[in-house]
Image (tube, rainbow, N blue to C red):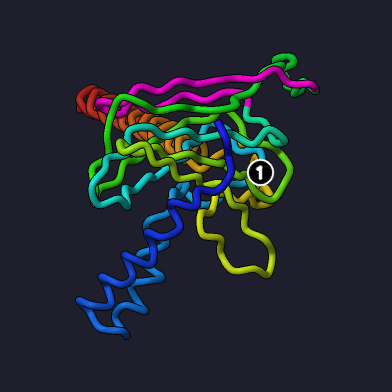
Amino acid sequence: MSLTPSPARSARAPRLLHRAAVTGGLAAATLLAGAGVAFAHVTVHPDSYPQGSEDGTITFRVPNEEDHADTTKVDVYFPAGQPIPSVLVSPVPGWTAQIKSVDLKTPIKTDDGDITTAVSEIVWTGGKIAPGQYQDFTVAFGQLPTSGKELVFKALQTYSDGDIVRWIDEQQPGQPEPEHPAPTLKLTPASADSDDSSSAPAKQQKAAAADDSTARDLGIAGLAVGLLGLAAAAFALVRGRRNA
């Protein structure tokens, strides 16, 4: 399948802006233009993760910007130069997900051994996104790359009328945003004062477990103090009776 830009797609944004200008005036149309175009993009959420994050999730948000056609297929291509070894997809009612993998020329070294394959593509089919609606497709990953500044996920959006929108354009430094930008996940430097491989959800789970452990320890200590107090009171009572 070709990843070249779709010329048929280029004329739709001006039509949308024209309708906004007619209904809301030129000033309102100018404000809606920026927001409307950004909302119509296929995007990834959250938009950033620390390098090397483990056991996290990313969500691809796919809006339908057509007036008279449904989105019936979504292809998301994973970056070949920055492989992600494994993913799990969250079920979406009405949609079927197919995960494709590729053999790696250079295996990924891990504590559990070498990883020789990585995810190359995920294809969602079978469902539909109606005009004026969007759909979230959530993916759980095992580990993100430990280097690089961003991950570019090129995507193809297929409509029921046969039109294909290619969200494949990469943002160039100092240049305006392209017409069909590819969903991009920024990779931030791993924090030095935390576990480099821990994602935010994993850290929250660890913190919750630590809180539970502390609460249990305090509860046990309080129970021990209470028992010692009861024993002391009982001893004093017995001793007092004997003296009497």
Q: Quadrant of the N terminus?
A: top right
Residue 130 falls within the magenta-colored stretch = no
Instruction: Looking at this view, name the residue that lies furthest to the front.
Output: 8
State the SS at label 1.
Answer: loop
Q: Is residue 123 above or below residue 25?
A: above
Q: x and y percent of residue 82 in the render?
A: 69, 36
- Pick the front one: 234 or 242: 234
Q: x and y percent of residue 32 in the render?
A: 33, 72
Residue at the image point whose x is 35% and y is 77% from the top: 31
Q: Quadrant of residue 212?
A: top left
Residue at the image point whose x is 50% and y is 21% from the top: 99
Q: x and y percent of residue 147 in the render?
A: 73, 42
- Tell me if mark 1 has few (under 14), some (14-19) or many (20+) residues whose alpha carbon lies within 10 angstroms of its own: many
Residue at the image point whose x is 31% and y is 77% from the top: 29
Q: Is residue 136 above or below residue 230?
A: below
Whether residue 75 appears in this view of the structure is: yes
Q: Quadrant of residue 127?
A: top left
Q: Main secondary structure of the magenta part?
A: strand
Q: Is residue 98 above or below residue 146?
A: above
Left or right side of 77 for 134: left
> In the rendered structure, which segment of residues is drawn in magenta?
85-105
Residue 103 falls within the magenta-colored stretch = yes
Provide the residue designation for mark 1.
51
Left or right side of 38 for 18: left
Circle 1: residue type? Gln
Q: Quadrant of the C terminus?
A: top left
